[in-house]
Structure formats: C-alpha cells, structure tokens
Image: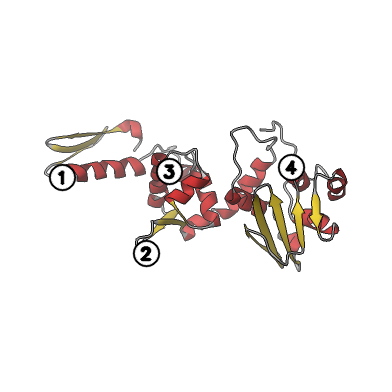
Amino acid sequence: MTESSWKVVMDRDGLTISGDRFKLTTSGAEPTQLEAVVSELQSVTRATYGQYCGLSRAAEMVGERWGLLIIRDLLVSPKTVAELHNGLPRISEKLLTTRLKEMEYSGVICRRDPVDGDHVVYELTEYGRALEEALLALGRWGAISLATPRPEDIVTADSLIVAIRASFLPQAARGVHLTFVLNLGDIVLHAKIDDGAVEVGSGALADADAVINPGAQLKALLTGEISAEEALASRQVSVSGDPAMLNRFVELFQLPRLKAPVPA
C-alpha cells in the first residue's frame, strides 16, 4: 500500500479508509479515537520499492530522511524524544515522532515504559542493534568525502562517538590495552581499548595513557593524509604524555585509504 493508493475521510458518520481495491467504513467511534486511528495509519503506511530484496526492505524501514541518524544516536544510548531532538535539532518534532513510530512498527526500536513519571525512552531492539556493523561501514565510507564543515553543520558528542567507533581497527588492537582522551573543541571523548575491543564514551579519564588534541586534523590523521610526526611538527596537534602515543592512536583508528571523487 502506498500513500497515493489510499485515502481517509472522516465525517459525522464515521471513518472511511479506501484504496484501489478496498473500502473500510467504521461508525459510532469517538472523534478522538478516529483521529488516533488516522495518525497510526499514517505513521506505519509508507511507500515501498515493490521489490523482494533485503536491501530494498532495509531502505523501506530505516532509509527515510533522518532514520539512520536516529539509529546512530540510539546506538550510543537509549534516549527520550527530547534528547533525540536535542541531538538532531533540524528535524521537526512531528517528523521525529513519525519516524519513531515507523521504526517501532518495523521492530527496529522499542519504547521503555516511564518509571515514576519519567518520559518514555526509546532504545534499539536486538534486531535494531544488528544494524551497527552496516551503519559503521556506511559512516566510514561517507567520512572519506568530508571536507571543511559547512556553515550549517553541527557536531555532536554522539556523532563523534560513532565516528571513532567506526574508524577502530580490531585486528590491529589484538593484545592492546590502552586508553585515550580526545579533546575535540567543546567535546571530550575517551576510548578504552581492551584486546581488540573498544569502548568509546563522553568525558575524560583521569588515568588515560594519552590526551590528544587533534584540532582540525583528526580526519587527515585517520585517512593518512598527514602522519603523526607531520601533525606534531605542524603544532596544530598536541599530545599530553608520550608523543609516540599519537602514532599508536593512528595505527588503531583509521579510515579507508580511498580518494573521494567529490569532497562534500
């Protein structure tokens, strides 16, 4: 069913939902109940590609505008609607609510009931969390094309946490036990590496092996456009602790060595 193949009419006699091959009429319901039915239908009924294909189905569930960014932020932690909107300020609250309903209907996210009057919290289901590998891979691919931030671009802690996780090389970190702190403007992150696994979160660590201040050179370091030695020599990048730890960092965190055809 697509948005163009059905219509909803609500009047004094009730609610009529009709399409090319069906017509459903209800009567006797309260107007507020009818409005709720219409809202629910609109949130879960959307265009399809009409193809029996896993990629097609995935795009239908999470490929609508803002969908992947909602999942990105929920990969970091469960959030309320207000917290999601704070990290994605350019999405309207109405559209955000619609996207959440769509993904809840698809089984990608679920809501956690409020406790003691708290707000509803949304989190990824087990099915939704299985998107992590694909989302990180897409993020790595897109990061190659990043150039100078556009005037309207914002950077959030959640987006940086996911970006650092996406650039981590598990194979290079086998047997490694290190901690880093990254000072990225107003955002401070930490990365804990433990034998091929990484945990990235907000805030500093008092006992970190190194505190790195990459300035505007983080992407260039991750793509190998500049070496750790060149970055330190430029004085645009600094390290608190052993300077050799910057080279260790870029051995463990890298983006694909591909040339982007059109930086964006």
* Disc with the residue nearer the chain's start (3 vs 1): 1
* Disc with the residue nearer the chain's start (3 vs 4): 3
Q: Position of residue 36 (x, y in %)?
A: 25, 45
* Disc with the residue nearer the chain's start (2 vs 1): 1
The front one of 118 and 173 is: 118
Q: Is residue 54 visible?
A: no
Q: Quadrant of residue 148?
A: top right
Report, in whole angstroms, how far the alpha carbon at label 3 lies from the one at label 4. 31 Å
Question: Which secondary structure lies at badge 1?
Answer: loop
Q: Position of residue 98 (x, y in %)?
A: 39, 43
Q: Amino acid type of disc 4?
A: Ala
Residue 17 left/right relative to 216: left
* Disc with the residue nearer the chain's start (1 vs 4): 1
Residue at label 3? 96
How busy is the neighbourhood of tag 1: few (under 14 within 10 Å), some, or many (20 plus)?
Answer: few
Question: Which secondary structure lies at badge 3?
Answer: helix
The front one of 178 and 181 is: 181
Question: Which secondary structure lies at badge 4?
Answer: loop
Q: Position of residue 181 (x, y in %)?
A: 71, 58
Indicate the quadrant containing the N terminus: top left, top right, bottom left or bottom right.
top left
The front one of 124 and 126 is: 124
Residue 252 left/right relative to 12: right
Any mark on residue 115, and which?
2
Residue 27 left/right relative to 211: left
Q: Amino acid type of disc 2?
A: Val
